[in-house]
Every structure is written in C-alpha cells, then in structure tokens.
Image (cartoon, rainbow, N blue to C red):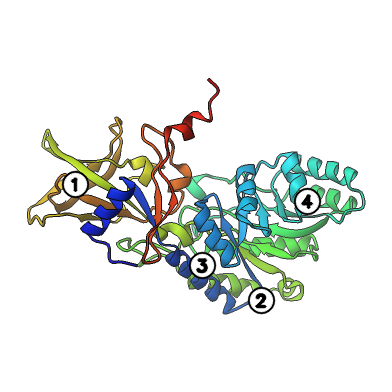
Amino acid sequence: MEQINYTWLENLANKYGTPFYLMNSCVYENNVTQFVTSLKKYYEKIIVGYSFKTNYVPALCQKALALGCYAEVVSAMEFDLALKIGFSNIIFNGPIKKYDYLTKAFDLGVIINLDSEYEIDYVLEYRKRNPKKLMKVGLRVNIELKDSEGNSVIQNGLRSGRFGFSKQLLPNVIDVLRTNGIVINSIHGHTSSSDRAAINYETIVNYMLMICNEFKLDNIEYFDIGGGFFGAAANGIDVSNKPTYCDYSDIIFKNLLKSNWFNKTKPFLIIEPGASVVSNVFSYVSKVYQLKEMNGKVFVTTDGTVFDVKPTMHKNNLPFKLYSKNNNTNSILCDFVGSTCMEKDVILSDVSMQKPNFGDFVKIDGVGAYTMALTPSFINYVSPIIDISNDNSKLVRRRQVLKDITDLYVF
C-alpha cells in the first residue's frame, strides 16, 4: 500500500470526491488470522462466524468468506446478503425470525439459534409440514454478567439482558423439542458487556457448560460463545489495559478443557467477532472548508459528518491526522465539525493541531465497527468506500446518488 500523504489523498479526492472511507482488507485478514491462531493453540475445531451487523460491506464479507468464516446474521436482510455473496455456511441468530426465513434456514441446513418462545411454534409448524426431515436447532441462553461486587456489566449498564431463554424456560422448551424429535445441536451464549473484559467469558463458558450438563445436551455440535470481544484498535487508542485475543483464548479454554462434557462431546467452538476484527480496518477522510471563531471557540468545518464517523454519538475523540498542502507551525485548539445543519455534528472536540487551511484533509481512524451499517442518508449522500489494501486503490462502494434514494419511494 502506498504511503498516505496529502498528494495521494488529493488524487483520490479528485477521482471520487470527498468525504470517503478507506478500507484495508489486509488488516482485516490479519486480525481474523491472529484471533483464530490464539484459539487453535488449544483446540482445532474453531469456527469464526463473522458478525454481519457490525459491518456488512460486501467486499469485506467476501474477504471473510475467502478466509473460511461463516456468516453470522441476525435478520432477513443479512441472510439474503450472505446468500448473495456466496456463503453456504450461515449462523442464523437474532430475536426476530419470520416464518419464511426460518423455513429457508431449515431447507438450507444452516445453524439456527432460537431466541424466543414464538420461534418454537414456528419450528413445530415446520415439523408438521416436514414430518420425516431431520431437524436441528440451537438455543440461545440468557446469561447474567456481574462484576466482583455483584453489579451488572451487561451492555449499556442494563440490569438484565433481554435475549435468549432463561433458566426457568429451558426445561419446557427442551422437552417440547425432544418430544417432537427435534435435535438440539447448538448452544449460544452471546452476552454483550460494557467492559468487554476477558473474565466475562469465564462466566459465559461455565454457564453454558452447566446447561449442557444439567439438561444432558449430548448432541451439541456447536458451542457458540458469541462475540463482544475487544481486539483490533486503531493506532492512537490506548489498549494498555484492554484484553488481547490471547487473553480471551486463555480464559475460554482454561474453563472448557477441564470440562468432562466438553472433552467427551468435542463440539466446534464458535466465536462471532465483529468490532474486534474490523474496528481498525476503516478510516474516514473529509475536506476542510473553513475555519471560524465564535465567542472564543474555534470551529473547523469539513464536508464530513459525525454521523459518518460515530453515528452512536459517543463523546470520545477517535485518532486523527491532518494532511496539509502547506506546513503551518501555528497550532490551534478547535472542534472539527461537519457539514450538516445540526449543532451536535461535532466530529472531534477540543483537539490541538496545526492550523488547517481550505483544501486540507483530516483522516479519522478506527471507524470500521457499526459506522457504515448505521450511517443514514441524512442531509448528505452516503460516502464511497475505497479499498487500499493493494497498490492500486479500488472502489468497493460508489457514492450514493439521488436515484438510490428516490427509487425506494412511490410517487
């Protein structure tokens, strides 16, 4: 890959316009490979189910397919996309599985992890229509995550997560499935945490093992611990106190390999990484248009938007770099703001840098997770994506045009 500099960015801007995303699929490949290597140090039967919801850019998903990953999907849209890209190995998760897609999943023989009681009714309906078919389903179990003081560390500080089957529901659910000749071949324990701590996976793994032992789930083929890992991070993000791929692997297998059930059953271990393998794969480049001072505050206005960089509107400044045609030794304290008419469109807050000029570029790193999947057609057209993993840049998503928007509507 060529060295990124002002001239190189200017050439891309002249060709594709600004703003735009940069994608380095080689970084993605390295992240996935490192995670798998850390797990295979202990156990060979590893499956990576790449989380489509985190970033479903087709060129990235094609790379996942080439690496041997499964597609981990949680909706009809993602299911259809996985099939279009060419995945035959699919993990169908999520709280809403409409009957036609559950039927498609059974017909195609993909891994299905049920989440709710209504899905049992759909499964039984399919059984009535296909009485001789060997049917296999998985169960997502609801797991409490707490810190050493007993406080919940569920994502967003929630007291309880809402997904999966509770321990109270499992006896009846398992009995109904078994009575109707339906094999339980997967257990799914994905539980999102606020801290992404490695110790959470000790809780997840041991709870899943307890369920497998207590309910004698001896037909389990897939032991799916889900995602929610930390991992890849852009340069400039402090990772000194964050867990590594090896930290997760160590704690997962410290608990799995001492289990008689696991050593006897020998299921595939599934991980479903998203942010942990894609966060540092993408950057976002926008162009500086003006610098203005208002009531003692300096604003640098770009043609990008915060909705393209961090649509969840978190307050953290991501790593950035200014690329200027002319070196300027004067530095300023400023906010980088976007092109929308929203006051909250603040991309970088209170950052110090050399004084920018019209036509300079600012590159924001670490925008690979959820950003593109959540970016709306709000005020501006959706930005293009350029793969720069090879010497020649390649457009993998063009800029949105008006027809893309109006074709959805009936006039």
How far apart are the two marked residues, 2 and 3, measured between alpha carbons?
A: 26 Å
User: For the residue marked with disc 4, what is the amino acid?
Assistant: Phe
Query: Residue 101 or 345: which is nearer the viewer?
Result: 101
Give coordinates of residue 227: x percent, y percent: 55, 58
Q: Which mark is residue 106?
A: 4
Label 2–label 3 contact, CB within 8 A: no
Q: Which mark is residue 359?
A: 1
User: For the residue marked with disc 3, what is the amino acid?
Assistant: Val
Q: Nearer the viewer, mark 4 or mark 1?
A: 1
How far apart are the two marked residues, 2 and 1, measured between alpha carbons?
A: 60 Å
| Residue matched to label 3 | 32
Label 4–label 3 contact, CB within 8 A: no
Q: Secondary structure at mark 3?
A: helix
Q: Nearer the viewer, mark 1 or mark 3?
A: 1
The image quarter in which residue 293 lies: top left
Disc nearer the start of the sequence (1/3): 3
Give coordinates of residue 378: x percent, y percent: 40, 33
**Quarter containing the N terminus:** bottom left
Q: Residues within 10 Å of mark 3 (few under 14, many from 20)?
A: many
User: For the residue marked with disc 2, what is the amino acid?
Assistant: Lys
Q: Residues within 10 Å of mark 2 (few under 14, many from 20)?
A: few
Image-based side of 257 in relation to 282, left or right:
right
Residue 395 can be seen, yes or no: yes
| Residue matched to label 2 | 258
Give coordinates of residue 101: x percent, y percent: 72, 43
Q: Residues within 10 Å of mark 4 (few under 14, many from 20)?
A: some
Disc nearer the start of the sequence (4/3): 3
Q: Secondary structure at mark 4?
A: helix
How far apart are the two marked residues, 4 and 3, measured between alpha carbons?
A: 28 Å
Disc nearer the start of the sequence (4/1): 4
